[in-house]
Image: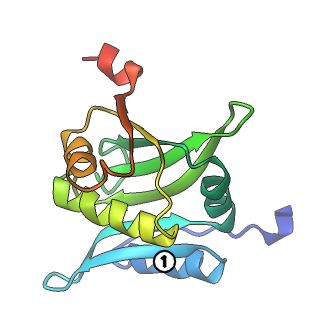
Amino acid sequence: MSKSNVQIWWINGSNDPTIFVDFFSQNGYDCTKDINEHEQKYTKLFIISLLMKNNYNIYEDIIIIDATYRVNKYALPLVIFSGFTYSGRNCLFRIGIENNEKEKTYEWIFKNYFQLHNHKYPRIIVSDQDASILAVVAKCYTKFIKYYFHCSWHVIRI
């Protein structure tokens, strides 16, 4: 993208998620969202680009899932799905924001993610020892996902 095509925009206020979804949708990204109808608030919001889809289609054997814990201005977990290229470089598969790290949330995330990829499942998942992720994988995906590992960096930090 050339410098002249870069748009700078600020997110401020209660319509932030709508601005976010509109911006990325208009620029070729797929946005998956979940809205609490009663409160009219987004509970989950994920984006994926064509490059991210292609990355997963090529390098889907291992997914690394990591959620930052409330380090953004919304105090919400940022969830990153990533993997490795054949040359050992990191590549992104999906990014998003969720309202909590509960089992039901990860059920929704995995269901939507694998539907988007025509039910292509990785052989290995690596995560940060999140009990909710492990529970969802054990309950729903053991037929497809053969191994579940804890990230050694997270294990050492305990």
- Give whichever of 9, 101 is nearer the camera: 101
Amino acid type shown at disc 1: Val
Quadrant in the picture for the C terminus: top left
What residue is shown at x 28% (from left), y 48% (from top)?
A: 137
Q: Nearer the viewer, residue 29 or 129?
A: 129
Residue 99 visible, this angle:
no
Residue furthest to the left in view is 38
The residue wearing badge 1 is 21
**x%, y% of residue 115?**
44, 71
Image check: 26 left or right of 98?
A: right
Up-down relation of residue 116 to residue 150 (above or below): below
- Residue 51 locus on image (x, y percent): 69, 61
Residue 30 picture location, percent across and down: 55, 75
Q: Is residue 5 above or below residue 153?
A: below
Query: Quadrant location of the N terminus?
Result: bottom right
The answer to which of 103 and 38 lies nearer the viewer is 103
Seen in the image, is 48 located left or right of residue 110? right
Disc 1 element: helix
Category of crowding for the residue at label 1, using alpha-carbon neighbours closer than 10 angstroms: few (below 14), some (14–19), many (at least 20): some
Q: Is residue 138 visible?
A: yes
Report the colour scheme: rainbow
Q: Is residue 92 above or below residue 104?
A: above
Q: Residue furthest front?
A: 143
Give the side of residue 81 with respect to residue 45, left or right.
right
The relative height of residue 72 versus residue 5 in the rendered view (above or below) is above
The residue located at (31%, 59%) in the rendering is: 98
Q: Residue at x 36, y 41 (%)?
A: 68
Q: Which residue is located at x 37 percent, y 59 percent?
A: 97
